[in-house]
Image: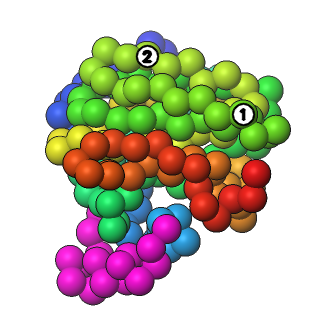
Amino acid sequence: MIPEHVVIDDKSGLMTPNTGRYRKRLSELRGLFQDAQVLEAEIRTKGDPVVYEVIEYKKGGSDLFFGTTAILPGKVNGEYYMTRGHFHKRRDMGEVYYTRNGAGILLLESPDGETSVIEMRPGTCAFIAPNWAHRSINIGAESLVFVWVCSVDAGHDYGQIVRTGMRKIVVEREGKVAVLDNPGVVP
Ligand code: PAN
Ligand code: ZN
């Protein structure tokens, strides 16, 4: 292996060169948002918009990899666009999220239900401690772009969050951002 570098466009999250990328559209995020009916209507009327894009840089044999996530601005009946959220398969492995553009909330949750909220602004570098589930949410009018770095072995465990949701939801209420208890999660 040899040292290399990439160039990241902070506004869009485009990373050049990269080794892979994927997009998630609303139709692939069914079950994530509170209002399933409005979600279906948005898919029909807005042509199944992209919610977020992940671009990565991974070299075979390395211990680390990194990439960008760009979450577009948008809401589903007041609930802001977000990522799926996950624990790492390797619960002993954390991550770093370095925000480069926009405004967001990093929602974290421990296995025993403790919650932590970190504001994401350009310059915020968040330490995601091992064994905390993490989801990022775009609460602004621009793309929320952050750079993430973690171990190639960390992996994703989406199961628990898909089954139970996270304990908090982030919505717009009377023109303001509100972090509320998820009515679907029994405390
Ligand atoms: C990030 C996330 C990325 C997309 O690279 O995977 O932001 O979020 P979801 O995977 O929850 O849909 C990361 O935390 N990797 O470990
Ligand atoms: Zn992660």
Q: Which residues make up the magenta segment?
A: 34-52
Q: Image point 82% across, 38% down: which residue? A: 112
Report the mark closest to the observer, 1 or 2.
Answer: 1
**Quadrant in the rendering for residue 108:** top right
Q: What residue is shown with label 2?
A: 125
Percent coordinates x, y for residue 95 in the rendering: 59, 25
Res 70 visible: no
The kind of secondary structure element at disc 1 is loop
Residue 41 position, x and y percent, is 31, 84
User: Which colour assignment does the render follow?
Assistant: rainbow
Percent across and percent down for residue 37 are: 41, 83
For image coordinates 28% across by 33% down, the residue present is: 103
Q: Position of residue 76 (x, y in %)?
A: 34, 66
Question: CB atoms at circles 1 and 2 under 8 Å apart?
Answer: no
Type of amino acid under label 1: Glu
Q: Label 2 sits on what residue type?
A: Cys
Image: 97 above or below 184: above
Decide which of tag 1 and tag 2 comes sooner along the chain. Answer: 1
Choose top left, top right, bottom left or bottom right for residue 155.
top right
- Classify mark 2: helix, strand or loop: strand
